Every structure is written in structure tokens, then in C-alpha cells.
Image (spheres, rainbow, N blue to C red):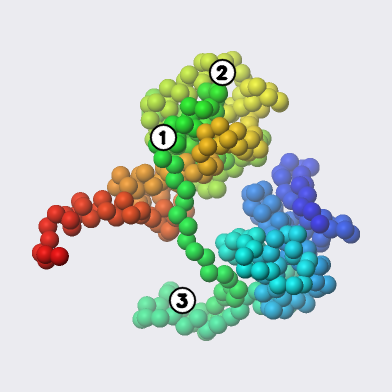
Amino acid sequence: MRVSKVLDPASNAVSFTLIGVNGVVEPAERYLRYLAETERSPNTIKAHAHDLKDWFVFLGEHGLDWQSVKLEDVGAFIRWLRRPPDMRGQVFSVLPSIGHHCGEATVNRKLSTVSIFYQHAARHGLDLGELITCWDPGARQGGWKPFLHHISKGAAKQRRAVKLPVTSRIPRLLAPDEVQSILDSCGHLRDRLLFALLHDAGIRIGEALGLRHEDIAVPEREITVRRRDNTNGARTKSPHSRTIPVTVELIRLYADYLDVEYGDLDSDYVFVNLWGRPYGQAITYAAVHDLVRRLRRQTGVAFDPHSFRHTYATRLLRENVPIEVVSKLLGHASLTTTVKTYAHISSDDARRALADAGWFASRTVTL
């Protein structure tokens, strides 16, 4: 079974489907087509396709019909996901010394995809909606009641029944000397500008790859992230545009890049192929991943493009930039996302805050 890329001949929109031994897996195809029709991003559709691939491979190995599985089978699916791929077909128990193949967050994401897949099927007439979800009265604590509570108070509330507990992980942050090492190891101004932009503006790699010259306001020292269709498949997550102030050093680097390497090339895109093929076309995610692998070997720094975003957000918070401003700069739809992801503190952060508060200087008790 494999995930296959498909292209809509009418709109050139990219999507994905699931191919089995007997051709297209129709239940998965209906759901993936629904995602494409509701204009979900190709990366989202691809991720859901791979999650459903795992589910249907599991069902095939265990001789289960997708329409008649039980909640107990979901538990078996979790155990199956946690095993190394070459041991999933074996019936004996795996020793605890063998690490889990899929982490808790990955397992939960796959369960969420399968849950939504079955809810979609249930809305189209199949009695499957309670496989991964259950219903409870959902009594609300406290005296506050939402608007129209008198209408919805008797309705059941839906929640996913199966979910693994996940340990929160602090994002990987880059030290200043690591960032400098990465920038200095770039052999081209284009590559240096790319990582300098990620560091200076905290944008996502997809937002950087879709950047156009019109998005860079040189006199104002600002860049604007806009959602649009890009030939290299790069996408922004937020449907709303946002403008981010950047340093004068970044603007100078952009000017040097245009003068030394970009030249008279006629292209709207900022980051393009200048030494590879097809010449002048916007660079792709794959090209950036190859570049990151080379720089990781060269510098010894374990990083990915998103590491710059984590570092940017954490640096702003440590400099006491209001969290609502940080959230706006990052393009988060919810302030909760910013708080949950980036408002972590290290022991050094805690010590600095205590020192600023005078905790170590003035003591009322002799120890």
C-alpha cells in the first residue's frame, strides 16, 4: 500500500490518494477528496493519507473489515504503531528495552486522523461514528453557562475516547554561536539570507519559500507574509497576512544578494534556483532539506528550519515583549497556542527572574 500524489487537471491543485493491491482505497479516497475540496493544504492531505495508510495496513494484516472494527482493535492498533515496522507482523511481545517506533504525539495524531475519517464516513450514512469517539453528558462545572445553553444543555458532548498521555517537550533552541556558525557556513548569499530571515523574522520555512520581492518593504524594513498559491508548493498556515519588522542588517543582506547573485533574473520569487535546475524557479522544500543536511554535517549543529522560529519566539519573550505581540508576529490564530508552545522557562530564566525580584538579596530568615 502506498500514498500517491495526484494533480487536478482543471486547477493544477495537488492532492494525495491511497493505493492498495486492488487499486484506489475508496473509503480513504472519499475522505482525502473531501479534504482537497475544502482546500486543505497539500501537506495536511499528505499527512492524513499516510496516517490512513497505517490504519488500512494494520486492518489488512489482522484481517479486519474497516466497517466492523471495535474499540479493542484501536488498542491493538496503538500497540502495532509502537512496534518497529519490521516487527509489526509478529505475534510475540516486544521487550521494553526496544524503543517505541512512534512517540505519543505521533500516535495521537494518527488516532485523530482515523477518528475524523470515521466521523466523515458517519455523516455520509455509515453507522461508524462511535468507533473512536464516545459521548457523555458533559456536565459543566461552575455557575457560568454559555449562550443558548437552554437549547444545547441536553446534548451529548463529543470527545476522543483513546488518547495517549504526552510529555511536554521544550523546543530546540539555537545558541547565538550556533546561528552564527550556520550563517557563516552558507556558501551562497541566497542561503545565508534564507536562514538569516528565519532567524530575524521567525517565519515558517513555507512562508519564506513563498516570499516575493513585493513582500519586502526596504525603506520601512518590513516583510509581509501573504497566503497565495506558489509554484513550488510552499504554503502559509494562516489565511491572514501579517507584517513583521526586521533589522537593517537583513535588508542589507537582501540588497547584496540581489546585486551579487540574483542579477537580472526575471522572477517574482526571492529564493530561486541559481545553480541548479530548473534555473530561475522557486526553490522547493526538498532543496532546503538537502541544504540543511549539508549544513548539519558541516557545522555539527543539530537544527531544522523550525529551530529558528522557536529561538525567535523565545528570545522575544525573554526580552519581555508582550505575549500578544509575539503571537501576532508568529501568525498564531490563538494566544493559547503561543502560551502553550513558547512560554516555557529554563532554570536560568527562573534564576534571573528571582534575582530581578530581589529574592536572593533580601532575606528575612537566616538559614
Q: Earlier in the sequence, mark 2 or mark 1?
A: 1
Q: Residue flagged by tag 3: what amino acid is it? A: Leu
Which disc is residue 177 wearing?
1
Residue at image point 78% right, 68% down = 90
Residue 70 lies left or right of residue 304; in this view the side is: right
Residue at (72% x, 75% y) in the render? 73
In the image, what residue type sits under mark 2? Answer: Glu
Residue at x 48%, y 29% (from the top left corner): 183
**Count of numbered marks:** 3
Q: Position of residue 173 (x, y in %)?
A: 44, 45
Q: CA distance from mark 3 to mark 1?
A: 56 Å
Residue 293 on image: x %, y %: 60, 37
Q: Residues within 10 Å of mark 2 (few under 14, many from 20)?
A: some
Nearer-N-terminus badge (2/3): 3
The nearer-to-camera label among 2 and 3 is 2
In percent of width and height, residue 281 lies at 66, 27
- Compared with residue 113, is residue 220 higher up or lower down, i.e. above or below? above
Q: Which residue is mark 2?
A: 261
Viewer-side label of 3, 1: 1
Q: Position of residue 107 (x, y in %)?
A: 62, 64
Question: Dot 3 surroundings within 10 Å: few (below 14), some, or many (20 or more)?
Answer: few
Quarter of the image with the N terminus in it: bottom right
As helix, strand or loop, the secondary structure at mark 2 comes to helix
In front: mark 2 or mark 1?
1
Instruction: Name above or below for residue 108 compared with residue 153.
Output: above
Q: Earlier in the sequence, mark 3 or mark 1?
A: 3
Numbered tag placed on residue 148 in the rendering:
3
